[in-house]
Image (spheres, rainbow, N blue to C red):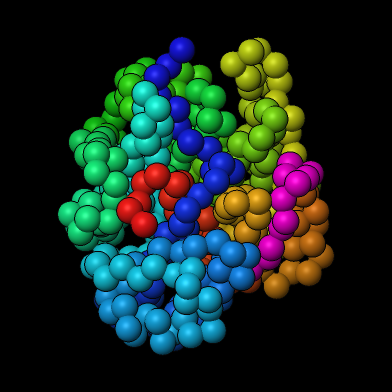
Amino acid sequence: MNSIRFIPEWEPVEYVMLALPHEDTDWNYILPEAIDQYRRLVKAITDEGISVMLLCRDAAEAAEIMVDCDQRLIRYVAVDYNDTWTRDYGMLTVVRNDRIRALDFGFNAWGLKFAADKDNLVNMNLNGMGLLVDGAYRNERDFVLEGGSVETDGNGTLLTTSRCLLSPNRNGGKTKQEVNEVLAARLGTDHVLWLDHGALEGDDTDSHIDTLARIAPDDTIVFTGTRNFDDPMFEPLLAMRAQLTMMRTAEGNPFNLVELPLPDPVCDAEGNRLPATYANYLVANGVVFMPTYAQPDKDELAMRTIRIAFPTHKVVGVDCRTLLQQHGSLHCATMQIPHGVCKI
């Protein structure tokens, strides 16, 4: 039995961590709209009684922005960062020998695509500020790993994509076996499932798994698909679906597959397609926060579909069209922090 357990997203959390856009992030060209997007997201989370750790440059200024949110549920942390995608530079949490550990993996902005020097120091700075429980922080930054690139069931199974984790700009082109060994040693995952197909147009993460397929309780995988033969995404997502049907649990059983619809194309001002996906949802304390895209029929179908995988959870939709403008969505902008990581 492995002594390390990678904590799945649906287990209880103490905080959801977000980072407020500021003028030195890539949001500067639509900063008021971006700040409002994050305000609405924080409000949706706190309205469900879930606490938020909000990274910001100025706590007093951030509190003014969040004035319509329950201030008792927001912990403002003044720290610097390049951008707001906490999913990918936030800590990954495991239980090791019955003690919780917050693992700080390296972050290089999805394979050296953007600046990430400040993002890569956020977790170390949080620990240096005395926010984390003594002994919880672990420096794992010799290995690049983004939270959006891995999914777990909490029982040793991990789902990821070969395009991302085998990227030469992340870990020097390690082989699949070498990456498997690192994941087993640090996350305790001894059953790694590799998806080789599926890549959304406009995605600059090299096929993060949280845009394509998500592990849910009871050996279920929720995945993105489309039945529109004319959509350029049809063939890649069909190939991904075929591969998912061939995957097996650690016990050798097929997964329960639940197919999410693909949103209608959403494009930027230049007409380039953005990576809209309903798979980019967040699970926290009995609630699934799902991105919506002002497509009533598709949005409703996606919410009903997620209820199949999470029948005891409440599903809350949050319009995430602004997040899409920087090629991310709801899950990308959030990172759950389980109980026992932070000092109260």
Relative placement, left or right, of 147 versus 137 is right
- Magenta residues span 308-318
Q: Is residue 210 visible?
A: yes
Q: Position of residue 128 (x, y in %)?
A: 18, 54
Relative placement, left or right, of 47 versus 27 is right
Give the residue displayed 59% in from the left and 16% down from the top: 250
Q: Residue furthest front?
A: 344
| Quarter location, residue 165 | top left
Q: Position of residue 85 (x, y in %)?
A: 40, 60
Q: Position of residue 30 (x, y in %)?
A: 43, 82
Picture layout, residue 33 above or below residue 131: below
| Quarter location, residue 19 | bottom left
Give the residue displayed 78% in from the left and 45% down from the top: 311
Picture layout, residue 315 above or below residue 180: below
Residue 233 versus residue 86: which sits nearer the camera? 86
Relative placement, left or right, of 334 versus 21 is right
